[in-house]
Image: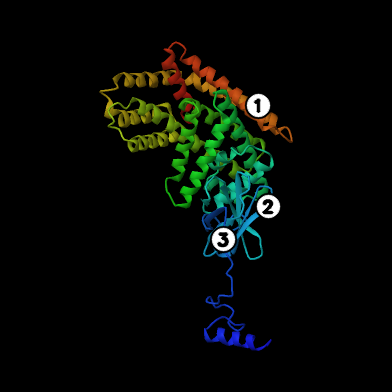
Amino acid sequence: MTRFPLALGLLTLAACGGKTAENPDDPNDPTVVPTPAPDYAMTIDGRVTDANGQQARFAGVGTMAATVSVQAVTASGQIVATADVDAGVYTLGLETVPSDAFLFVQALDAGGDVLGSVVVELTASTSLSATPLDVESSVEAAVLEALLADQVAVGVWAEVRERIDVAVALAVAADADTALAVSNVATAIQASFEAHVDAWEEAGASVDDLNAASLAATAQLSAQLAAGQDSANELFAASMFDAATAQGLTAEAIAESNSIANAALHAALLATQASTAVAVETFRAALLAEAAGVEATINAQILAMQASGSLTATEVETAFTDLQTAIQGATTVEEIEAAVAAWRATVLGAVEDEITSQLDFLDQLLQTLTDALADIQTALQVLDTELDGVITDLVGTLDFDVDVLAGDIGAAFDDLQAAVEAEFADLDPEDAAVMTSVSLSFPGM
C-alpha cells in the first residue's frame, strides 16, 4: 500500500522519459517549477573596454580580459546590482531603483578588486545604456565621487564631462599620486562650476532648470557614446548651449560665463599645486571647451545674418575651425588680421550682396579692435595681476573656499569687461555691445 504506488509512479515517469533523481535537468519534468525571471525595475547595458592607457584602477589595456563581473554602487557605497561579464559585455538588473541621480558601475576582477568605473545617469527610462567603461570614464567617476562627497550639487556632473577628456584622464592615471590628482581636478572643477553658477544667476537664468537640462544632456551623451556615435561630444556641446539659451542666456553671456569659469579653474589648479601634466591638460581641455562656446556664439551671429540660406552649417563650422587654428597659432596682430580676413571671405562672401551693412560693420569692428588692441592688452595685464593676487593669497593658505575663489575671479573679469567696454563707449550701444562681446569671446582676449 505504501510502496506500490511509489514504484508505479517511478516506472510511469521513467517510461515517459520524465525527470528522475538521475536526470535532474530534464526540462520536460512537470513536477519541476522553473525559477521565474526577475521582474526588473531597470536594466543597464554596457561594456568594458581596453581603451586608453595601461590597466590600473582607472581601466585601460587588459581590463576587458581581467573583468569577470560588474556591480552597480550608489554614491554612499550601497551595492544595488551585480552581473557577470561576457567578453566585456554586461547587463545589470535593478529590482528597485535608488533615488540617487547617479550609479557607479564598477568592473571587478576575480579577486573583487575594482579595475575601472563608469557613471550612469538615472533617468525615467527603464532601460539605460552606459558609456563604455575606459580610462576617461573611470577618472570622471572618481572625480564625481569626490565632488558628491563634498556635497557639491549634482549639476556639477556636466562640468566634469566638459572638463575631463582622454588627455586629462591619462594625466591623472599616470600621476605619481593618483588620489591627490583626482582631488586637485575635483577642486578645480568645483571652482569652475561655482563660477558658472554665479555667472548664470547674475544673468538671470534659473540654475535649477539649467542643472536639470544639463543632466538630461549628459544622459543623452552616454547613450550616444554607447551607440558609438562619432559626433556625440559635439552634440553634447550643442545641447548644453541650447539649454543655456533656453533659459534666456545670450550667446555673449554664455561665452563670458565660460571665460570666467576657465579663469576660476586655472586659479584653482595653481592654488592646489596640481602636477604640471594634470594642470596643463586640464586647462587645455577647458580652453578647447571655451573655443567651442566661441564657435557657437559666432555661428549664431552668422546664421542671424544669413538671409539667403546659401551658407551651410558645415561651411560655417569648417571656416571657424580654420580661424580658430590660425588664431591659436598667431604670434602677431597681423597674423590675427589675416586669419579674420580669410574667415570673412570664406563665410560671409556667399551672402555679401545681401548683408553689405553687416560686412561694413565687421570691417569697422576689425579696425576698431586693432586700434584698441593695446588698451585691451593693458586691461588683460591688469586682469592677470588681479588673478595673480588671488592665486597668491590662496596658495599662502592650507585651505581655500571655492565660493570665494569664484567671486574673486568674477570680480576680476568684471574689471576687464569694464575696461573693454570703455574702448567702445563712443559707438552706437548695439554696435558697442557686439564689439565688446567679440573682444571678450576670442581665445586669449
**Quarter of the image holding residue 199?**
top right
What is the tally of numbered marks visible in this picture?
A: 3
Please rate how many residues cluster around mark 3, counting C-alpha atoms within 10 Å: few if below 14, some from 14 to 19, many from 20.
Answer: many
- The x, y position of residue 77, in whole percent, is 68, 51
Is residue 9 depicted above or below 126 in this figure?
Answer: below
**Disc 1 to disc 2, C-alpha distance:** 44 Å
Q: Which of marks 1 and 2 is nearer the N terminus?
A: 2
- The x, y position of residue 271, in whole percent, is 66, 35
**Residue wearing tag 1:** 389
- The x, y position of residue 138, in whole percent, is 58, 51
Kind of residue at disc 3:
Thr
In front of the other: label 3 or label 1? 3
Q: Earlier in the sequence, mark 3 or mark 2?
A: 3
Whether residue 133 is visible here, answered yes or no, is no
**Residue wearing tag 3:** 63
In front of the other: label 3 or label 2? 2
Whether residue 354 is visible here, answered yes or no, is yes
**Residue wearing tag 2:** 78
Q: Which residue is drawn at 49% across and 45% down?
A: 221
For mark 1, give the secondary structure. Answer: helix
Kind of residue at disc 1:
Gly
Q: How is the image coloured?
A: rainbow
Please rate how many residues cluster around mark 1, counting C-alpha atoms within 10 Å: few if below 14, some from 14 to 19, many from 20.
Answer: few
